[in-house]
Image: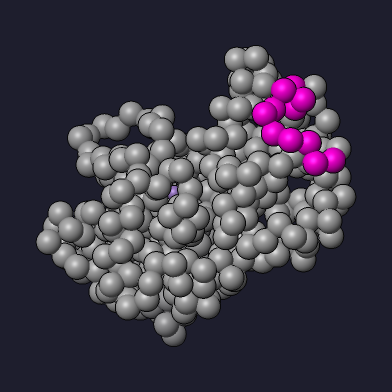
Amino acid sequence: MEKIYITGHKNPDLDTVCSAMAYARLKNMLDPSNEYVAVRCGHLSESCKNILSALEITPPPYMPDVYPKVKDVMLSPNLMLEKKAGMDELAKSYKDSNPSVTPVFDGGRFIGLLSIDDITAWYMNGINNGSDLSRIPTVGEVMRDQAEPLMAGELFEDAKKALSASPKRGLAVYDGDSFVGYVTRRCFLKAPKYNVILMDHNEPRQSIKGIETANITEIIDHHRLDTMKTSTPIFIDAEPLGSTCTIVYELYMRNKMTPDKETARILLTGMMSDTLILKSPTTTAVDVEAANALSEIIGESVQDFGIKIFSHVESLSSMKPEKAILTDFKRYTEKGVALGIGQCEATTLNDIDDYKEKYLKALEDVRVKNGLDWAVVMVTDVMKENSVLFSTDFKAAGNLPYALLEEGIYDMPGVMSRKKQLLPEMLFALGM
Ligand SMILES: [Mn+2]
């Protein structure tokens, strides 16, 4: 039984976490011989947390990276060898295996590793000193000084270096204060690989840390393809739909499975969020059909469910401006111009006067800190399908086809999509 982690992108949004959760449920039903675990590789925004908790959906656990660790290769003791036992106890198990080290306990408490070097040294010293070698010594007499132990969460590569630099044949492994196992040199012959399914992204730099060391088994996504090479054939489902949750719903259908009520709520949450209640221009007929089918399962209209989700979005006036801008912030470099485009969702634009000054100031700070030439943030009213754009002082901003409301702020009626509407206009404004 192998473990396969299903992760969305960094700066997780609702589509990323919800598609991972719903897909893990499907995969566990389709393939019970393996264990599929949904995880998230970043922290959730306050709005995401609020929405998930209002819907009583538990988000996937946080997993910072997929680098192989000491715990993935360590051995557990198969013999409880006590310090006061005679060496004949150990000799018995030598018939079947000849371990290079054996953990030693004192009243059940781990005290160290006994290595074959200890045994050799004990006999060699005995010969040198003219001791009586026909006497069988205790384990405690033979075991020598111990080296610094490793921690279970330490990286495989670091531990491999530590052990090869050490004169010891093995090292104990601890998790906090407790002994959990041990490693020998043989444990480090080959680095284990984590199995990972990428959801809602495919570019390595948007992925969980250490993805370059992992084994990617599938990609389910609705973004442009800019992924890495794989060593084996893999399943890829990349479709230009409004949300990855729609693709997951399609996969339920293709496998003749119907999502249960809770899974339907999870899928519809990601779908509503990524398509801005099916109003974003990224929305397709397939998304609409899937949303209707899911709304039937949960017995709530798409519109009501969508509004419920966005009613939990934190208002921009109460958020820290820099944090709000960076929650969903994408960088692009086009013809040597470094751009940064953030997008925030709101349920009204009537309160802009309350926060416009601090957001413009924070946006300039974000621009400077990130070495950008031009930074903007679009605030989208998901109810009325309008946006306003905050922009730092940049010459090409004057070429944008939007009406200037006041310095640094533009009106964008009907604009909802960063990638389909705003980005092309910004590139055009730059003369590209
Ligand atoms: Mn998405």
Residue 383 placement (x, y as % from top left):
57, 60
- Kindly identify the residue that appears in the image at 33 percent across and 61 percent down: 291
- Please provide the residue range marked out in magenta: 396-406
Instruction: Judge from the rendering whether residue 145 lies leftward or rightward of residue 190; answer left or right.
Output: right
Residue 404 belongs to the span the image colors magenta: yes
Asked if residue 122 shows in the view, the reply is: no
Q: Is residue 375 left or right of residue 361?
A: left
Q: Position of residue 224 (x, y in %)?
A: 41, 33
Residue situated in front as seen by the camera: 48 or 186: 48
Q: Is residue 423 above or below residue 10?
A: above
Residue 19 left/right relative to 356: left
Q: Is residue 315 visible?
A: yes
Tally of numbered tags = 0
* Point 44% across, 67% down: residue: 303
* Colour scheme in use: one colour
- Residue located at (77% from left, 61% from top): 351
Residue 293 percent coordinates (x, y)? 26, 65
* Outermost residue toward the bottom in this view: 107
Q: Quadrant of the C terminus?
A: top right
Q: Is residue 321 magenta?
A: no
Q: Is residue 158 or residue 267 the one in the foreground?
A: 267
Give the quarter of the figure containing the N terminus.
Answer: bottom left
Residue at left 18%, top 58%?
253
